[in-house]
Image (spheres, rainbow, N blue to C red):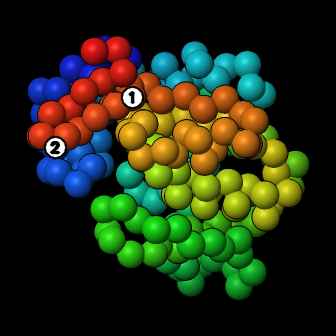
Amino acid sequence: MQLLKDRILRDGKNLGGGILKVDGFINHQVDPVLMDACGQEFARLFAGVGATRVLTAEISGIAPAVMAARYLNLPVVYARKSKPITMPNTVYLTVAPSHTKGHMVELIVSPEYLPRGEKVLIIDDFLASGSTIQGLVRLVQAAGADLVGIGTLVEKSFEGGRELLAPLGVPVVSLVTITNMDNQQITFLDD
């Protein structure tokens, strides 16, 4: 998606160690026009998978997931990283390593919002090692729901996440794919 690629090149920063700083438009301050365009593209790409619900992780996945769900006319569920008192005692819970936080984080979903038999489309901001998305997949499986697709804004293909997800047998779509971040550069798949 050229619009997202251009924005990364203009405002993204390669911080080294595989960290791409995009918090000025994706995951701290959000550009709603950009997220709207990304949501439309996800909706176009996943129109035929039969999703009944969109699942993401708190907090960075919420903006693209909400916009995709808007155009797919579906509810969004986000896995929380801490359990509020309003959530029931029995929950779906898994842990996943956070690349940017440097430690394990919990992913928690109430069974009330991820019922058995749902057809779940996962939308998140990044596909890197695949660990967070794999955690979301475990929540889908624990709920007895069916995974129908995975979409991410940015894939860092050099971290191997796509290979981890391949055995799931569902479409995995990234709006842009970065193949290399060595020497402070950002190289895209189509460069």
Front residue (pair 110, 61): 61
In-image side of 83 versus 159 (left or right): right
Query: Can you see residue 102?
Result: yes
Amino acid type indicated by mark 2: Asn
Q: Residue at x 40, y 65 (%)?
A: 98
Amino acid type indicated by mark 1: Thr
Give the mark, 2 or 1, whose residue is nearer the N terminus. 2
> Mark 2 Cα within 10 Å, few/some/many (few <14, many 20+)?
some
Residue 48, image quadrant: top right
Residue 177 numbered mark, or none:
1
The picture places residue 140, in percent across and down from the top left corner, at 73, 55
The picture places residue 87, in percent across and down from the top left corner, at 63, 76
Residue 25, image quadrant: top left
> Mark 1 Cα within 10 Å, few/some/many (few <14, many 20+)?
many
Q: Residue at x 63, y 72 (%)?
A: 94
Task: Please say if 133 is above or below 122.
Answer: below
Q: Are marks 2 and 1 in contact (CB under 8 Å)?
A: no
In-image side of 61 versus 168 (left or right): left
The picture places residue 114, in percent across and down from the top left corner, at 74, 57
Residue 9, image quadrant: top left
Residue 14 numbered mark, or none:
2
Helix, strand or loop at disc 1? strand
Q: Quadrant of the N terminus?
A: top left
Front residue (pair 49, 181): 181
Q: Residue at x 34, y 31 (%)?
A: 179
